[in-house]
Image (cartoon, coloured by chain):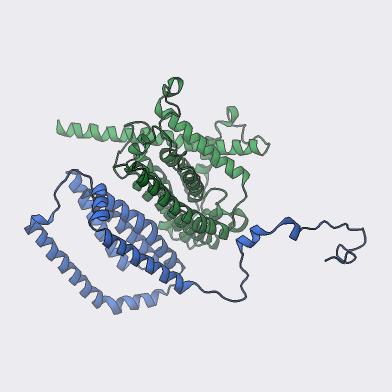
Chain colours: A blue, B green
Amino acid sequence: MISSFFFYLFAAVTCLAGLMVVTARNPVHSVLFLILAFFNAAGLFILLQAEFLAMLLVVVYVGAVAVLFLFVVMMLDINFVELREGFQKYRTLGIVIGIILLAELFTTFFQLTSDSGALPEATGVHNTAQLGRVLYTEYVYLFQLAGLILLVAMIGAIALTLRSRPGVKRQNISTQNSRRREDTVRLAKVNSGEGAEAKEGSN
Amino acid sequence: MMENNWYIELAWIVAKILAVIVPLLIAVAYLTLAERRVIGFMQLRKGPNVVGPFGLFQPFADALKLMAKETILPAGADKTVFMIAPMLTFVLALVAWAVIPFDAGLVLADINVGVLYLFAISSLGVYGVIMAGWASNSKYAFLGALRSAAQMVSYEVSMGLVIINVLVCVGSLNLSAIVEAQRDMWFALPLFPMFAVFFISTLAETNRAPFDLPEGESELVAGYFVEYSSMSFALFFLGEYANMILMSAITTLLFLGGWLSPFDFAPFNLIPGPIWFILKICLLLFVFLWVRATTPRYRYDQLMRLGWKVFLPFSLIYVVLTAGYLVATDSLPG
């Protein structure tokens, strides 16, 4: 009884939050609702006893991706009127894509219920260990391939943003650390009424 | 009968939660006092010692004062987000305690993915800060929030890799199993460099000195909570200190053997586990205060350099080393 109550709670909040993401006036509110939706989706995963996926969703999407998202959106210079016009313009396209996605979801859903063989068997090993076991044995090449794709994406992002502008004073930590006392500090005897540098002539 | 049992069960759960949260809040209150006293002694002055014996009632006086103040909503602030932010910070600092084991079996929820849960909750802490900074509609608060977001995301990466080091040695994500795996030797010894990296990262993650740039007084007034007053300010304050205790508890569980006594013979192993656990947390908290009293604040680029160019490669290499050692000696768990 309690689990079905929580299912309806999480599901309802996820749907509402998803709706608010597209209808909220302020983009920052949209992102915050998106985070709420992620969070409730994680709750649904826990109800399915997929606790590893739930935690991963929170760590990766809520803890990292959405933070950077929020970061960018907060610094945008937002024109609310233009935003409304954009909403009107893309509404039809959005509805069409939504209907297609929903149809796909329904077809998989009905296939799943009519053919119960799609559900995994209970093995007694909890799913974090099971996931690790399968990922690093059966699918190890695909897993490494996914890692390589991410690496390429990362290098690409760095290559796109790395610019060396001339005339910028940059700190070089290793040269700073390799400076010795003798090179930079000099004890000078200064007579009163005379400058420190003028008479020494050693500078 | 069924309904009756249901109520009893619910009341039992609530009682257990209160048994964790009430001592925690008292600990937070006295941590604020301890900080002022310890730093006072380190700086050769007395600190608050007037309210009650040794100043022991000072936290309550502070709380009363804050409650009596007016809550100010700045003009142009996003009111909802502005009010949610401190609550979020505070709640997140509390919910993580659900999976912290105080002794063998003495835990609210003994879940299989305990470490991941803690990691997830600690990575959410940034939202309280960033929401507060944005909703305040103030330049200072916003800059503080941006700094904090970048800082917390950066140090989380190396924290994750340090946690992987521990997990490779244990073979489980369950916190009780992690503590039990340290029965022979605490992980702080073989993984000492990782222990140091983790502790420094927790300083950055809780926005404490020397990484307290989000609230750098000299350039940002008070950072992200500039516009907060009264209880909403108090919630941030309590959240920060509760987070310090939480991070110390996580460090204790991962590296200092949780509730296990340091020596497994007579006078030491008679002392109950929770006492050891609390003592270890207090030790780490003292180091938190010690660091604050003795180190100057990092510059922002130094902070980023330390996180990305020093800690991240170092902890990554250490993961390879640890895993390589375990495979070579055929002592990989699980």
Kindly tell me whether residue B226 is visible in this rendering: no
Q: Residue, x 15% and y 33% (percent of image)?
A: B2
Residue at the far top: name it: B266
Q: Depth check: give the residue in front, B79 or A191.
A: A191
A93 shown above or below B315? below
In which quadrant of the rendered image does the N terminus of chain B lie? top left
In which quadrant of the rendered image does the C terminus of chain B lie? top left
Please indicate whether residue B238 sits to the left or right of residue A59 in the image.
Answer: right
Query: Residue A82: x and y, percent?
Result: 38, 78
Mark count: 0
Kindly tell me whether residue B130 is visible in this rendering: yes
Q: Depth check: give the residue in front, B119 or B37.
A: B119
Query: Residue B329: x and y, percent?
Result: 36, 43
Q: Depth check: give the residue in front, B225 or A176.
A: A176
A160 shown above or below A16? below
Please indicate whether residue B44 sits to the left or right of residue A130 in the image.
Answer: right
Residue at the far front: name it: B328
Q: Residue, x 30% and y 58% (percent of image)?
A: A38
Query: Residue B293: x and y, percent?
Result: 61, 43
Q: Residue, x 56% and y 39% (percent of image)?
A: B35
B35 shown above or below A70? above
Please indicate whether residue A86 sits to the left or right of residue A45 in the image.
Answer: right
Give the quarter of the image for residue A155. bottom left
Query: Residue B287: x and y, percent?
Result: 55, 39
